[in-house]
Image (spheres, rainbow, N blue to C red):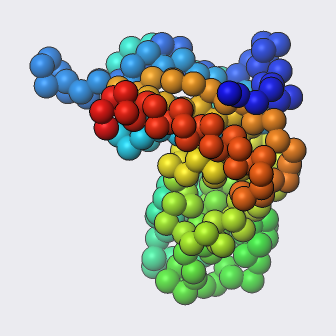
């Protein structure tokens, strides 16, 4: 059972030009008999300003899909378009440079864009303020908690002035309380900046808590098994009855996929 169409789902139905579009995308690693089919004929779109959560069993190709959208790899078949939009990516590990200050880590994204040094410092401070880390610019990554390091990573992603944010289990290694706080932060920033987000997670409730839509991939090779529109009023709470009900339906469908493929 899926939820009724959300506003953004209605916009997709009306034909808004997608921020991200995959048509019949497949990805094979290797060649011949040793080739591994990771993604099989994936068709998926993300509307401008839409938050899409991507779920599936381990090894179903979720991270592969993000790599293709980010341009880090190329599809074996099919077409993929981001319409010339800028892409930023966040991973489960913050991947900060330990020898640089927090501010300097954020400034790296601005330096690549050719922003002058004085302006880089000012804008880095602004992005740190956005993620509620004002005053921490002079700290080193090892002086911060895991949640704070992920906030720095988010600030660095925002500094890329991207239109599309790809997130590969960014909160998977955090404790539940920190994860909930970062859900609130991410939702606030997403809504304020109008980003299109493709968010990979193994946590079904997290997927429902954050997403306008939950896309479920089958076990390898990854295919779109089902899509769930999330028509739950924001702001949401992870343990609310509405989130729990839809998460239960998604979990049941995920279990079917896992059992069907014998994983």
Tell me what residue is drawn at x 57 percent, y 72 percent: 175
Q: Quadrant of residue 223?
A: top left
Residue 57, compared with residue 95, is above or below; it is above
Where residue 52 appears, as percent x and y from the top left, is 66, 37
In the displayed structure, does residue 27 sit left or right of residue 236? left
- In the picture, the quarter occupied by the C terminus is top left
Residue 54, compared with residue 237, is above or below; it is above
Number of on-image labels: 0
Most foreground residue, 255 or 117:
255
In the displayed structure, does residue 80 sit left or right of residue 27? right
Tell me what residue is drawn at x 51 percent, y 60 percent: 172
Most foreground residue, 99 or 212:
212
Does residue 180 show up? yes
Where residue 31 appears, as percent x and y from the top left, is 17, 21
- In the picture, the quarter occupied by the N terminus is top right
In the displayed structure, does residue 239 sit left or right of residue 53? right
Residue 230, compared with residue 40, is above or below; it is below
Where residue 33 appears, as percent x and y from the top left, is 12, 19
Residue most extreme to the left:
33
In the displayed structure, does residue 23 sit left or right of residue 195? left
Where residue 222 appears, as percent x and y from the top left, is 41, 27
């Amino acid at each position: 059972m899926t939820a009724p169409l959300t506003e953004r789902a209605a916009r997709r139905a009306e034909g808004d030009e997608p921020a991200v579009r995959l048509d019949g995308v497949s990805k094979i690693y290797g060649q011949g008999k040793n080739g591994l089919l990771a993604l099989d004929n994936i068709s998926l779109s993300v509307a401008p300003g839409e938050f899409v959560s991507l779920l599936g069993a381990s090894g179903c190709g979720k991270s592969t899909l993000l790599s293709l959208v980010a341009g880090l790899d190329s599809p074996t078949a099919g077409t993929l378009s981001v319409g010339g939009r800028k892409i930023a990516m966040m991973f489960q590990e913050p991947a900060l440079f330990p020898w640089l200050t927090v501010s300097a880590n954020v400034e790296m994204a601005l330096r690549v864009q050719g922003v002058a040094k004085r302006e880089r410092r000012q804008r880095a401070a602004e992005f740190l303020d956005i993620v509620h880390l004002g005053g921490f610019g002079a700290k080193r990554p090892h002086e911060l908690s895991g949640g704070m390091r992920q906030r720095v990573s988010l600030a660095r992603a925002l500094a890329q002035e991207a239109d599309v944010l790809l997130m590969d289990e960014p909160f998977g290694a955090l404790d539940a309380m920190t994860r909930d706080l970062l859900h609130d932060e991410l939702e606030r920033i997403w809504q304020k900046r109008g980003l299109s987000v493709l968010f990979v997670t193994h946590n079904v409730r997290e997927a429902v808590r954050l997403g306008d839509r939950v896309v479920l991939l089958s076990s390898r090779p990854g295919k779109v098994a089902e899509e769930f529109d999330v028509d739950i009023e924001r702001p949401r709470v992870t343990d609310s009855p509405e989130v729990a009900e839809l998460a239960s339906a998604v979990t049941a469908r995920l279990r079917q996929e896992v059992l069907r493929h014998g994983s």
